[in-house]
Image (cartoon, coloured by chain):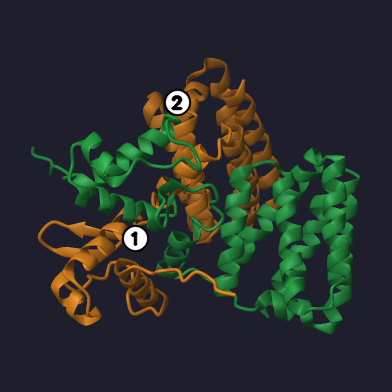
Chain colours: A orange, B green
């Protein structure tokens, strides 16, 4: 029997080659790519194919083009997964609850992991964010500090995949549950409860108590879920 | 002060327009896009820009081109996140342990969620996969059935984001911890333990007992973690 031959286009070959160079560690983050002309010669393809491949890699968020300087492998991937996942989310007709459900499970377990790994220096850094959050009166700044608190806990987990995934979930929340954070944070009744939640999470982490950290985070996430959905 | 103007290229505009049509639900999964010529007229840009945009969207895994039929919005996104995440993983110099750590936390919580949501029909379906896994002698088929068992639990959670994320984690495992599954599954000493684990997880789910399901899954994940890393 015959099976159809999948035609790989020239620009796809170029993309594959660049990806392979990343996998082989011949290209690292921040590295400058050779100029288009040189790439075309190296790979024996037209400059048009090189340009198509570079554009696709730019759209994917893996390389960035700096005016007059050339193309570089990106160093920051905080928003790389957002574009594909937000489109998938919409096409799958997913519901906002699914974002909160996923965030809840990840944040609970990340808090536990962070409690195991937190250093004394990081306890101070997290405390600094929490104190700013407590004293902050400006609603927009509060939203940013709240995000920063959660981002810091992901960071303390020392697992870059968790940071990537929680970062894309956070962007999905901002996009699909618009202003949810601000509405929750600016509600007078919630203000004290939320400060208390963050303090409880901080205290558990500073004691390096994983069970307590996950219980406190679960309580916080449950509260957010109920307030976002209703 | 002046801030640099970020130049948005024509093909980026085209991508943004197509993404907006997805967000507005004017384009749904499986939909056929207008021919390139028509798109160029509709958006008032050159066919070259249209082609560049479509290629980038193809590379991102959001559209697929069918020979002689045209371009379609994809319906299956199981591998869409793999390409960007695997490159990010490599560029961040992440460690294989991070994949297992993330998988562990998600699978534990997904098992609990699935226990809440499982239907009687799904209990039968999961039982069917488990029985095949128990009787299977072929190592490769066993790997596939093991994956199917875990995929089914994600499916039962009825959260498509969880399915997407677990699917990309599974691909990362296959790619960065090569043959790990096969090595674990084909070890004579492990065989009985693994069957027992899957049975315990199945039993907890069939009783719709979330706590038990997560405890059994945690035990299973811990075992896999230790066997993959050492």
- Whether callout 1 and callout 2 share a subunit is answered yes
In the displayed structure, A87 sits above or below B172; it is above
Q: On the image, numbered disc 1 is attached to which residue?
A: A62
In the image, residue B135 above or below residue B75: below
Residue under the image location 52 percent in, 23 percent down: A184
As measured in the structure, the alpha-carbon distance from the residue carrying label 1 to the one carrying label 2 is 29 Å
Residue sitting farthest toward the top: A188
Identify which residue is drawn at 87% across, 55% down.
B127
Q: Which chain carries label 2?
A: A
Among the 4 quarters of the image, the one containing residue A48: bottom left
Q: Residues within 10 Å of mark 2 (few under 14, many from 20)?
A: some
Q: Residue B225, image x and y in percent?
A: 70, 70
Q: Is mark 2 on a helix, strand or loop?
A: loop
- For marks 1 and 2, the one nearer the N-term is 1
Q: Write down the chain letter for disc 1.
A: A
Whether residue A113 is visible, yes or no, is: yes
Task: Identify the residue at horizontal 16%, vertical 64% (top origin).
Answer: A70
- Quarter of the rendering occupied by the C terminus of chain B: bottom right
Query: Residue B64 appears at what percent x and percent y?
Result: 43, 53
- The quarter of the picture where the N terminus of chain B appears is top left
Q: Residue A155 at x, y = what percent?
A: 49, 55
User: Which residue bears the numbered disc 2?
Assistant: A179
Q: Can residue B205 be seen in this view?
A: no
What's the residue at 56%, 32% (across, down)?
Answer: A96
């Amino acid at each position: 029997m015959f099976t159809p031959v999948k035609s790989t286009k020239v620009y796809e070959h170029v993309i594959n080659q660049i990806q392979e160079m990343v996998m082989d560690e011949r290209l690292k983050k921040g590295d400058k790519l050779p100029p288009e002309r040189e790439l075309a010669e190296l790979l024996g393809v037209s400059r048009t194919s090189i340009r198509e491949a570079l554009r696709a890699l730019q759209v994917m968020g893996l390389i960035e083009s700096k005016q007059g300087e050339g193309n570089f492998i990106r160093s920051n991937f905080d928003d790389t997964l957002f574009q594909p996942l937000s489109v998938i989310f919409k096409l799958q007709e997913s519901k906002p609850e699914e974002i909160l459900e996923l965030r809840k499970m990840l944040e609970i377990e990340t808090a536990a992991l962070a409690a195991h790994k937190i250093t004394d220096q990081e306890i101070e850094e997290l405390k600094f964010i929490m104190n700013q959050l407590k004293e902050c009166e400006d609603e927009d700044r509060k939203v940013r500090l709240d995000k920063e608190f959660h981002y810091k806990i992901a960071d303390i987990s020392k697992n870059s995949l968790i940071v990537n995934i929680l970062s894309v979930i956070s962007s999905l929340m901002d996009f699909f549950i618009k202003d949810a954070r601000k509405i929750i944070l600016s509600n007078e009744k919630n203000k004290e409860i939320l400060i208390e939640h963050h303090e409880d999470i901080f205290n558990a982490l500073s004691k390096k108590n994983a069970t307590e950290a996950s219980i406190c985070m679960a309580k916080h996430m449950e509260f957010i879920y109920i307030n976002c959905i209703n």
